[in-house]
Amino acid sequence: MNNFKGKNVIVTGAARGIGRIIALTFAEYGANVAFTDINDAHFAALEQELSAFGVQAKGYVSNAADFENSHDTVAQILKDFGSVEVLINNAGITKDNLLMRMSEQDWDAVIAVNLKSVFNLTKAVLRPMMKARQGVIINMSSVVGIGGNAGQANYAASKAGIIGFTKSVAKELGSRNIRCNAIAPGFIATEMTGKLPEDVVKEWQAKIPLKRAGTPQDVANACLYLASDLSSYITGQVMTVDGGMTV
């Protein structure tokens, strides 16, 4: 894996969970990390952990679902860091329910945070990346965006939308040496899945050829690969990180 020393990475929704591990992994490989989240409750601890790798690190309170706020945040990051080489659109929420019981508010909220945020942040980094004639954009989709899931129509729609967006951006910006790919995690062990009953977890694991849940580090490693020169001829693709669940 090549070194990211001197490169600046933005990770959205990074205060906890998968985003936090992504941020730490890039810092470990020498990248400066600007991370965002809806509140700063975990910022101080993460900034300290990231800085321990000898890199520049700063957290920004930002509502990724808000267009102007996202652009203001990226503008501030550019002032603080000077450039942005990698954007990882990781911010996301779930508001699961059967469609017949799903409220309009829960539909709108998931589409805004999961899908519109990807448009907002990508749009905000385009000009500096195009000017530099280089850049990598990685969007966090899901296996649910590929195969759907009962009780997650809003989440599935948002994650499927990310895949279409990713492929379109890759076609638009390839000539400017800007690559755009998506990652589709499967069953990943996080705080959220940790609240599931043991029998539900076992049922999920039984469907996975590798017979285990993935880890946030597995997802972070995929991000590292897609952001590196090792994947310099890969764009417009969806990398499933699911232990073979969708085979």
Image (spheres, rainbow, N blue to C red):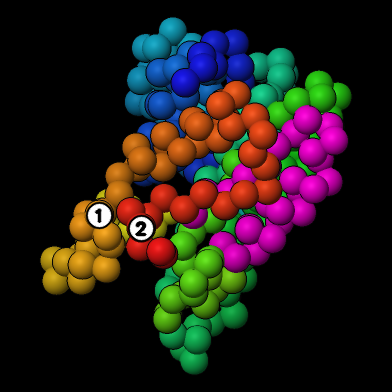
Q: Do the residues labelled 2 and 1 touch (CB within 8 Å)?
A: yes
Q: Main secondary structure of the magenta part?
A: helix
Whether the magenta-drawn stretch holds residue 164 is answered as yes
- Circle 1 sits on which residue? 210
Q: Which residue is drawn at 50% across and 36% down?
A: 223
Whether the magenta-drawn stretch holds residue 88 is answered as no
Q: Label 1: few (<14), some or many (≥20) within 10 Å?
A: few
Mark 2 vs mark 1: which is more N-terminal? 1
Q: Residue at x 33, y 54 (%)?
A: 243
| Relative horizontal placement of residue 42, taking residue 75 as reference (left or right) | left
Number of numbered discs: 2
Q: Height in image: 20 above or below 96?
A: above
> Residue 244 has which mark?
2
| Relative horizontal placement of residue 72, taking residue 87 as reference (left or right) | right
Residue 123, picture quadrant? top right
Q: Height in image: 53 above or below 129?
A: above
For the view shown, which residue lies furthest in the left direction?
198
Looking at the rendered structure, the kind of residue marked 1 is: Leu
Whether residue 18 is visible, yes or no, is: yes
Residue 76, picture quadrant? top right
Looking at the rendered structure, the kind of residue marked 2 is: Gly
Q: Height in image: 147 above or below 221?
A: below
Q: Nearer the viewer, residue 6 or 65?
A: 6
Screen quadrant of the C terminus: bottom left
Q: Which residue is drawn at 46% across and 88% down?
A: 101
Q: Which of 36 and 237 is in front in this view?
A: 237
Which SS class for mark 1? loop
Q: Label 2: few (<14), some or many (≥20) within 10 Å?
A: few
User: What residue range appears in magenta?
Assistant: 159-184
Residue 32: percent from left, percent from top? 54, 17
| Relative horizontal placement of residue 93, taking residue 201 as reference (left or right) | right
Q: Which residue is drawn at 72% across and 43% down?
A: 122
